[in-house]
Image (cartoon, rainbow, N blue to C red):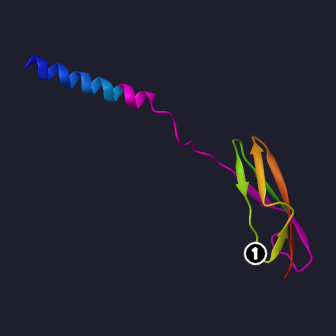
């Protein structure tokens, strides 16, 4: 009886230690996006601003337009991308 209890206690302690030592794999993040214009005609340009209090890479894509860059790396800061409408 004592041996079974001891085995269960050792297994429980092993799992408790394993759970405590597992590193965080994911953290929550937040960001905001704003634009200098809400709509564009062909040939017009707008500035998109991305802000975040965290560190990370932002991939940006655009339909019917050209981007000044398609990636931003931000570290507790903000970055801008210019968008020029093609249609």
Residues rendered magenta in the picture: 17-46
Describe the element under mark 1 as helix, strand or loop: loop
Residue 74 versus residue 48 in the image, above or below: above
Q: Residue at x 84, y 82 (%)?
A: 87
Q: From the viewer's perspective, is 78 left or right of 22?
A: right
Which residue is label 1 attached to? Answer: 63
6 or 27: which is nearer to us? 6
Judge by depth and name the residue closer to the eye, 15 or 29.
15
Residue visible at 78% across and 52% down in the picture: 72
54 is higher (above) or lower (below) than 47: above
In the displayed structure, 51 sits above or below 63; it is above
- State whether the magenta stretch is mostly helix, strand or loop: loop
Which of 87/9 is in front?
9
The outermost residue toward the bottom is: 87
Is 30 part of what is drawn in magenta? yes
Q: Residue at x 74, y 57 (%)?
A: 33
């Amino acid at each position: 009886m004592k041996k079974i209890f001891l085995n269960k206690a050792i297994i429980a302690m092993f799992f408790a230690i394993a759970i405590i030592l597992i590193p965080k794999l994911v953290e929550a993040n937040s960001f905001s996006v704003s634009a200098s214009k809400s709509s564009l005609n062909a040939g017009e340009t707008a500035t998109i601003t991305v802000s975040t209090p965290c560190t990370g890479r932002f991939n940006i894509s655009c339909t019917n337009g050209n981007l000044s860059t398609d990636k931003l790396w931000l570290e507790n800061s903000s970055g801008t991308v210019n968008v020029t409408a093609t249609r």
